[in-house]
């Protein structure tokens, strides 16, 4: 039967199929990342008895470093040999894609270091966390290299589906499951919208390949462009969901709050990196000729994200919710570079993504350790007096928060400066002014946390004074005052006696206990802070790096 | 069924009544699709809803045949009507069929009139747009013409192994995620062992010791 079919097939359709040439170097980092995940899941099922969290972390860190090395090698190769399109037009191999590989590989490395301490503390065993994180990272990398709308969609799904599961990873917290369900339902909905957009763009241009779309649009004047513009709009909605831009941001505060803290950091870093990479490539590179149509919409989304992100973060009491709105605000800033749609805008967005990745993962590393057992201490009161108890941790957190606020001599300042400069370049003055104003508003809520850390835990009278005062008398007043000392005293009676160890004055009888910072987490925080400060003072290398990471077609 | 439809279409083409037969088939298939879709929402018994879904999917398969897309029609019947709805039925059976939902109580007040209004608005807008504007851009598909002599399946197969080789291979990552994710979600955390231990004193002794050890770690 089978031979008969084969004979019939070769008889009727004799043409031999020429499979495309696979340029393995162009997808090497993705292959390593996926291979690491498969290796880990295989090894852990074969050696279940001997493999703990530590060895899973070891393999993950090794994979991330190997990916990073491969990406750096790619960078060298692209610089010397030039960019190209490979694997039947599915993959773009250019500075831009390699840049995203590097960002995501570092994000994975830092997250693996943080997750190690988290998993041990929460008693979650099993390698699935690292496996899913690596697969998710490979999806983000795929989005950075994708040269075809289908590949972008697959990257988006690989990235998202793994993150849905990771969001639900902490069985002990009900919020974790709730976050995952919300993320899944809204994410699946946005994916459907995105696919619909792909279908319409394919219908309008006859191709899903990005250069071919650009080619078609540059050679034809599309007079009746209803389908095309509808497709464009739906693609933008799909991307808007992933980057959490207003008005598609509704999922983000709940999901950020409910997910395990290391996952939130990873989510913020790689989902933004992957989605923005694809957004930049699709809109700047393929739909560049239609920029008059989409620029006003991106302009509006950017302004909404900047304003809503900054003002909504002001009223948050939960630090993870606050960071969610802060990430919405950051998305607005990165959209400034997208809206510019120039070479300068693209490199500014890339630089912002790189800087933001370090800042946000470092921030969530500190949030992870301060949350303590059960991953629940996310109120501002939990940060009160941290500067006294653990000065180094508080200093690191302060640096990361100030960098996010855009303080000078950090990468955060330069990131904001470059995107605003890109916006000014194309005369979007209103957008630039609103962005800077929102940065000023945003500085307030970052400073509120910093002030809370460095304000003394204080006597009860002190706190009740604040309680009596007006709400805007001082940032620290937001911390729920009367409860803090009482609850600490009540719960940790035994621990309070340990606070003798702290060098504080006798009033520290109500001092909170110190938090334990695992060694690997310290390394991750150190790397984040180090990068943020060193390349904030010496900006040259990274700025040049982002500047060279150009798109293949612009 | 698909083959029969195709045969009818070919015969009609031969006799020159293609447009009439096309139109007639479209109307019948569209009626099947719409009545099935309405049935899914209206039916009180979830099993009936699932069967109505089969009807809708079957109507869509007929529409695919009408577009000369035999392969998609077959896949539609095999995968959707065959596999996925059967899976739905399994889940419904597991959860219990007789537990029919009380539709009278609305979780969101006023959602039904709002839904009707929005759908009416959307359909009206769509029809108006279809009437007043020309939406197509005139681009041809890259996968190939539908009128060529090569069969549909052969064209799709060639695409999958040439142009879309990489996306096709990458899909495997999704399957890995599905397996690992299912394991991670389905595995409950090891339950706290609260079996009645004969020597309770041992447990009582060990508990404070563990707590002490924990406290030593915290500073």
Image (cartoon, coloured by chain):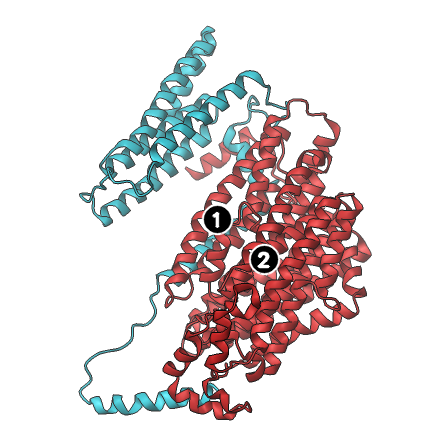
Q: Using a 10 Å C-alpha cutoff, classify the residue at mark 1 as few (fewer than 14 neighbours), some (14 to 19) or many (20 or more).
A: many
Chain letter for cyan, please: B
In front of the other: label 1 or label 2?
Answer: 2
| Labelled disc at residue B182 | none
Mark 2, secondary structure of its residue: helix
Which quarter of the rendered picture does the C terminus of chain A lie within? top right
- Residue A554 can be seen, yes or no: yes
Q: Indicate the position of residue A233 as horizontal and vertical percent values.
A: 59, 36
| Labelled disc at residue A187 | 1
Foreground pick, A389 / A544: A389
Q: Indicate the position of residue A30 as horizontal and vertical percent values.
A: 61, 58
Q: Label 1 is found on which chain of the structure?
A: A
Q: Residue at x 50, y 79 (%)?
A: A462
Q: Using a 10 Å C-alpha cutoff, classify the residue at mark 2 as few (fewer than 14 neighbours), some (14 to 19) or many (20 or more).
A: many
Q: Is residue A245 above or below residue A376?
A: above
Q: Label 2 is found on which chain of the structure?
A: A
| The quadrant where residue B145 appears | top right
Same-subunit check for callouts 1 and 2: yes
- Residue B57 can be seen, yes or no: no
Kindly identify which residue carries mark 2: A327
Mark 1, secondary structure of its residue: helix
Q: Residue at x 45, y 66 (%)?
A: A128
Q: Residue at x 25, y 40 (%)?
A: B105
Chain letter for red, please: A
Q: Residue at x 24, y 34 (%)?
A: B48
Q: Indicate the position of residue A337 as horizontal and vertical percent values.
A: 71, 49
Q: Are marks 1 and 2 in contact (CB under 8 Å)?
A: no
């Amino acid at each position: 039967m089978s031979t008969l079919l084969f004979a019939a097939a070769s008889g009727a359709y004799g043409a031999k199929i020429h499979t495309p040439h696979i340029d393995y170097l162009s997808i090497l980092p993705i292959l390593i990342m996926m291979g690491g995940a498969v290796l880990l899941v295989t090894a852990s099922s074969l050696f279940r008895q001997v493999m703990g969290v530590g060895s899973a972390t070891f393999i993950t860190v090794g994979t991330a470093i190997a990916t990073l090395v491969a990406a750096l090698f790619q960078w060298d190769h692209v610089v010397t040999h030039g960019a190209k399109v490979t694997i039947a037009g599915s993959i773009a191999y250019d500075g831009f894609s390699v840049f995203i590989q590097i960002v995501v590989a570092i994000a994975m490395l830092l997250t693996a270091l943080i997750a190690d301490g988290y998993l041990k503390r929460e008693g979650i065993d099993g390698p699935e966390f690292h496996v899913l994180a690596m697969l998710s990272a490979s999806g983000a990398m795929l989005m950075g290299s994708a040269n075809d709308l289908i590949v972008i969609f697959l990257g988006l799904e690989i990235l998202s589906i793994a993150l849905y599961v990771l969001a639900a990873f902490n069985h002990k917290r009900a919020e974790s499951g709730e976050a995952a369900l919300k993320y899944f339902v809204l994410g699946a909905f946005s994916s459907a919208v995105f696919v619909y957009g792909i279908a319409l763009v394919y219908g309008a241009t006859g191709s899903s390949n990005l250069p071919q779309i650009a080619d078609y649009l540059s050679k034809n004047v599309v007079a009746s462009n209803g389908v095309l513009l509808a497709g464009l709009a739906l693609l933008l909605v799909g991307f808007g969901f992933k980057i959490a831009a207003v008005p598609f941001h509704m999922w983000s505060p709940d999901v950020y709050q409910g997910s395990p803290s290391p996952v939130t950091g990873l989510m913020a870093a790689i989902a933004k990196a992957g989605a923005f990479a694809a957004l930049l490539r699709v809109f700047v590179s393929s739909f560049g000729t239609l920029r008059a149509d989409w620029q006003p919409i991106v302009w509006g989304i950017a302004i909404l994200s900047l304003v809503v992100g900054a003002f909504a973060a002001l009223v948050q009491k939960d630090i993870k919710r606050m960071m969610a709105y802060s990430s919405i605000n950051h998305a607005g800033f990165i959209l400034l570079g997208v809206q510019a749609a120039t070479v300068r805008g693209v490199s500014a967005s890339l630089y912002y993504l790189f800087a933001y990745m370090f800042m946000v993962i470092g921030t969530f590393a500190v949030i992870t350790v301060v949350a303590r057992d059960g991953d629940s201490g996310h109120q501002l009161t939990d940060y009160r007096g941290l500067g006294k108890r653990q000065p180094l941790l508080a200093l690191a957190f302060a640096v990361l928060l100030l960098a996010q606020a855009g303080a000078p001599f950090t990468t955060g300042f330069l990131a904001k400066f470059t995107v605003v400069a890109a916006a000014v370049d194309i005369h979007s003055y209103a957008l630039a002014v609103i962005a800077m104003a929102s940065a000023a508003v945003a500085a307030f809520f970052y400073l509120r946390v910093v002030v809370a850390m460095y304000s003394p835990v204080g006597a009860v009278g002190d706190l009740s004074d604040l309680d009596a005062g007006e709400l805007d008398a001082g940032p620290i007043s937001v911390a729920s005052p009367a409860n803090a000392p009482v609850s600490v005293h009540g719960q940790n009676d035994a621990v309070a006696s340990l606070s003798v160890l702290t060098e504080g004055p006798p009033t520290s009888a109500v001092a909170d206990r110190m938090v334990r910072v695992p060694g690997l987490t310290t390394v991750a925080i150190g790397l984040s802070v180090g990068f943020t400060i060193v390349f904030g003072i010496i900006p040259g290398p990274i700025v040049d790096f982002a500047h060279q990471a150009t798109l293949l077609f612009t | 069924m698909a083959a029969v439809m195709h045969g009818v279409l070919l015969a009609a083409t031969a006799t020159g009544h293609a447009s009439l037969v096309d139109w007639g088939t479209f109307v019948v298939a569209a009626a099947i699709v719409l009545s099935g879709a309405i049935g899914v929402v209206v039916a009180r018994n979830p099993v009936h809803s699932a069967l109505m879904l089969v009807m809708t999917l079957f109507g869509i398969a007929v529409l695919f045949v009408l577009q000369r897309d035999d392969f998609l029609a077959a896949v539609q019947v095999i995968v959707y009507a065959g596999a996925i709805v059967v899976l739905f039925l399994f889940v419904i059976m597991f959860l219990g069929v007789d537990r029919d939902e009380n539709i009278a109580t609305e979780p969101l007040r006023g959602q039904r009139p709002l839904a009707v209004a929005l759908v009416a608005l959307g359909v009206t807008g769509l029809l108006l747009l279809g009437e007043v504007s020309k939406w197509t851009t005139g681009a041809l598909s890259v996968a190939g013409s539908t009128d060529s002599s090569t069969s549909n399946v052969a064209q799709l197969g060639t695409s999958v192994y040439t142009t879309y080789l990489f996306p096709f291979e990458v899909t495997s990552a999704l399957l890995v995620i599905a397996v690992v994710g299912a394991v991670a979600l389905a595995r409950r955390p090891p339950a706290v062992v609260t079996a009645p231990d004969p020597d309770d004193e041992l447990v009582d002794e060990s508990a404070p010791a563990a707590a002490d050890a924990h406290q030593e770690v915290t500073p």
